[in-house]
Amino acid sequence: MLASALLVVSLRPAAFRIRPSSSAPVCADRAVHRRSAWPTLQFGSASEYKEHLTSQGSLPEGFRVGVHGFKFTPKEADMQAVMNITLIALDRPTSSFAGVFTRNSFCGAPVTVGKKRIEHSAAIQAVVINNKISNVCAAGDGVQSSEDLCAAVASALELEGGADAVIPCSTGVIGWALPVEKMVEALPATAAKLQADSVVPAAYGIMTTDRFPKLRTYPACGGRLVGIAKGAGMIEPNMATMLSFILTDVDVPKHELQAMLRRVVDVSFNCVSVDADQSTSDTMLCLSSAVKPLPPGEAALAEFEAALTALATDLAEDIVRNGEGTSHVIRVHVSGAPSSELARGVGKAVVNSNLFKTAVAGNDPNVGRLVAAVGSYLGKVAPELDVTGCRMSLGGQLIFHRGKFDLDPTMEKSLSAHMSEAILTGSNGESLKYPRHQRCVEVGIEMGLGDCECTVFGSDMTTEYVEINADYRS
Amino acid sequence: MLASALLVVSLRPAAFRIRPSSSAPVCADRAVHRRSAWPTLQFGSASEYKEHLTSQGSLPEGFRVGVHGFKFTPKEADMQAVMNITLIALDRPTSSFAGVFTRNSFCGAPVTVGKKRIEHSAAIQAVVINNKISNVCAAGDGVQSSEDLCAAVASALELEGGADAVIPCSTGVIGWALPVEKMVEALPATAAKLQADSVVPAAYGIMTTDRFPKLRTYPACGGRLVGIAKGAGMIEPNMATMLSFILTDVDVPKHELQAMLRRVVDVSFNCVSVDADQSTSDTMLCLSSAVKPLPPGEAALAEFEAALTALATDLAEDIVRNGEGTSHVIRVHVSGAPSSELARGVGKAVVNSNLFKTAVAGNDPNVGRLVAAVGSYLGKVAPELDVTGCRMSLGGQLIFHRGKFDLDPTMEKSLSAHMSEAILTGSNGESLKYPRHQRCVEVGIEMGLGDCECTVFGSDMTTEYVEINADYRS
């Protein structure tokens, strides 16, 4: 039932093979490391999923995590709220760390501080994360709030590096201010809960509207990587997702790790979308305790990068699977594209089409909307392309080629059945507190225009999505 | 209660004035012709609305319209469906006509034929429109189907110009084939219903998921323009909306009319979005019976263009007001932008943010999502811009400036009340078969970076939107 082995295979889930084309451009990033297309994980209940998390959640050597929750009243609203503080601490300061952040022009104060740490800090020894309030564009001085919190963490943990050794992350409501005093008061209790056994409490602690925690692990280079992520809405990362933390004991030099993380994010988190809304707070951090030396040579670096890619891809997919109101995950494999960028753009156009998303929610194989979405995107960005060679499949069945559909009632039923099989919610359509399986609605688009490909994951759109978001804060 | 007078005034609905900036670029299209920001039309019931349509729907001289419906079974699905054929006929062939069409790379067969007519036909004498099936990417030869239908129309109406004098338009399910034989059979009955009194039957006949017909009229140059439109979903026109027909008796030369229509579409239909899905069938036609001579001189042309702009803007807004599941219209006025294109992009980013749309549906002033959407767009397309001068308002109240919100519980209540007042649906949230009023949720964004502006209209997103689209075809 569990997929703990690292499989590094090229994945082509859809109905098409790449057609070799001597004149087509060659894509540098074509050999994306992916696992088998079909589900490897399947759970029958929330407790089965929890058991799985426990078995996967051991912290790499050199790390401790602690979580503490407290009640407070935001100054912007008449309500009582609960905030979790999560601490990730290293036994020793590390110079092996990397981070990528949102490109939103109105980014959060923690992003501003986090970027400074990645660039200027010689060593990192802790990450402090809060949910409920994102510290974005709040009244007062958000950057100072984050810095004050970092200083308090450094003091509570007696870190030699001071505030500069602490990276702050916040997620939650935009526009509200952090209750810094209350948070500082909560730090001793959080520090008292630090333990070296499991990352699972942190996977729970960082959640907001997430239905279930997201945690993945892979071995590499004689050590291990374990990663957690939060995020369910405002998800079309332009670097990473809301918040994701990957911890490892393998000592990868900082400059290698930073470059690697950028490449990895590009083929994992940058290929998913829940609602096409890029957050102000997206942050992905990778920290190494550097306990295990990296074996010499290029092969070890490649092995580590493959594991990091697989882990990030898993977490990115988990976020889509856990998207707000998601009842189906849509996997679009675009091939035969003239560039990787265009392949990703086509895939994103499909998973971001509200009309296609709603059709999938209803198990309605309204394939006209699929073609309309692809055509709308291409008409905007590349009207000069000849699209007559474009072929599309749904659930492995060829539905469109030579500019035409060939549909009949039997095909419609079969396509609808494929969609039904990928439903993630319960028999009454209710949300489950665990991911049932990893099946997707499989869309294949072979453009016949080159040699580049990309796999994009997205959510359907349900009435639950609207209900969650029509009054998120109350 | 009725707004029949043509008001040509510059509109700035939001809280900001344009700040003159000597170094800022000048926008050629700044002086957009708009009416007053606040509602001019208000209806208490469906019958009141119907009465209004009747009073507005007189056909300009030289036109007749007829509609006929029939039942059929599409060959692609086990279901019985009803299709309307709508004919718009001119008493005499006209050389005064213009059209703009979708830029979707997979456009419909009627679009292909329509483009050919606009370019190559010397004269037009009829338009044939069907709903239910859009004739896009269907099996068989969709273009031939459209041509066959045009030939049959020419024959039924005894048009000297033959098929080349007929423009075909289709809207409805993508991927299905037109039941051409059945349609041809229905033509004599349709022709028998042609009458010269009112365009209202056509406004009803072209509807698909529309809740109510859309019809506007303006006087100009001693003559009149009357326009109808259909469209409720798959609406982010990249030229026009699903289908729109503007009829006039003023004799505007074809080359002037075509250029004018492009300019008009750019500031009307290209500034609205219901669901960010650009249709495969978008078609906007303007036909003149040329009964009334255009007065000589530039002033007359300008007067006609102002009326055409006002009419197209009204229809475009009506389509948003009638969007699938729409319970609020959102009006975003972007000013102080470095270019008109960027102004429109910012506005579109706001009305296409699913998170902002759902918040509006819930009367939830989650203004963080507004800033996140603007920042996400700017971070992608213009990360070099300094956004610190950006100010935003909601319902005329300043909510964001100098990179910060300043929120409190009183402000939240006032913003929520503004949203409640703009609700279009009934007291139980149910759809109404008429537009209650023209109030909008008013968003103002003053970028402080230039002299360009744009007003964009969009829909909120409700559970009804999802329900309509989860199983549209059944």
Image (spheres, coloured by chain):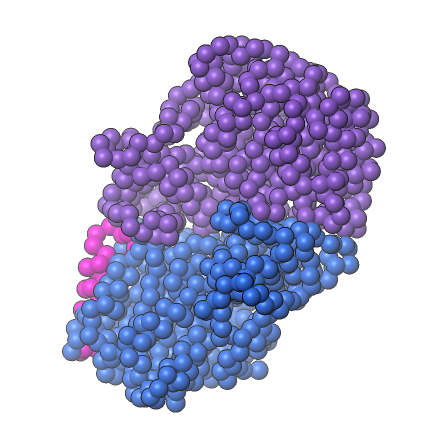
Chain colours: A purple, B blue
Q: Is residue A131 left or right of residue B375?
A: right
Q: Where residue B265 sits: x, y (%)?
A: 40, 68
Q: Residue at x 30, y 31 (%)?
A: A26
Q: Where residue B281 sits: x, y (%)?
A: 34, 60
The quadrant in which the N terminus of chain B is found is bottom right
Question: Is residue B39 covered in magenta?
Answer: no
Q: Is residue B428 visible?
A: no
Q: Does A90 appear above or below A399?
A: above
Q: Residue furthest front?
A: B23
Q: Where residue A306 sits: x, y (%)?
A: 46, 21
Q: Does B437 appear above or below A402?
A: below
Magenta-highlighted residues = B135-159
Q: Is residue A282 visible?
A: yes
Number of numbered discs visible in the structure rendering: 0
- Out of A236 and B42, give the one closest to the viewer: A236
- Out of A422 and A95, give the one closest to the viewer: A95
Q: Where residue A8 sits: x, y (%)?
A: 42, 19
Q: Is residue B74 left or right of residue B387?
A: left
From the image, give the main secondary structure of the stretch colored magenta: helix
Q: Residue at x 26, y 75 (%)?
A: B126
Q: Residue at x 40, y 64 (%)?
A: B241
Question: Is residue B142 covered in magenta?
Answer: yes
